[in-house]
Amino acid sequence: MSDPRTLVAVLVIACITSGAASVVRYAVSGDYWIFTAIECSPDSDSCFMGDGEEYPERFAYAHVKAHAAPVCDGWGGDCPPLVCESTATCWIEYCDPELDSCLSTGTSN
């Protein structure tokens, strides 16, 4: 049977390696998605209906890789709007009229 100290050492090394890999992936390379509500034009897109306070009155969701989003103070509210420039780092989720109450082409569904 193997020595218990060897097993503990292997487990500690595995935990440290896993933690370091997570820090590199999320904190350093920004390899995760963030999303926010962005303005939407009901004349050209199917928009979600917001309350005008927490969400804009007409909005869609922008999903952006963290490394592609502008660096700003999200809690302070002084961030530039998110813009999708590449489908690899960003996509916009519009309202699906079959699942949600949507606002499209100037009418409420």
Image (cartoon, rainbow, N blue to C red):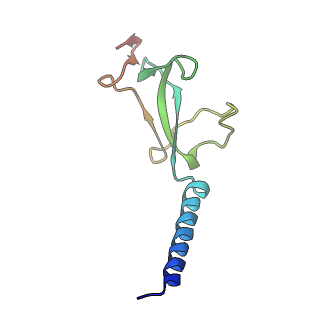
The N terminus - image quarter = bottom left
Q: Residue furthest top?
A: 107
Front position in the image: 66 or 5: 5
**Count of marks placed on residues:** 0
Residue 40, horizontal then vertical, whole percent: 49, 23
Measuring from the top left, give residue 55's x and y in whole percent: 54, 23
Residue ID at (47%, 32%):
61
Q: Is residue 50 above or below residue 18?
A: above
The residue furthest left is: 98
Residue 7 or residue 36, whichever sits in front: 7
Give the quarter of the figure containing the C terminus: top left
Q: Position of residue 56 (x, y in %)?
A: 54, 21
Residue 102 visible to the viewer: yes
Q: Is residue 104 above or below residue 75?
A: above
Query: Can residue 45 be seen by looking at this rendering?
Result: no
Q: In the shown orientation, is residue 73 left or right of residue 54?
A: right
Q: Is residue 76 left or right of residue 50?
A: right
The image shows residue 101 at horizontal and vertical percentages of 37, 19
Q: Residue at x 49, y 19 (%)?
A: 50
Taking the spot 59% from the left edge, 43% from the top edge, the residue there is 69
| Residue shown at 34% from the left, 26% from the top | 96
Work out whether 96 lies above or below 90: above
Relative to the observer, which residue lies in front, 64 or 4?
4
Q: Nearer the viewer, residue 64 or 45?
A: 64
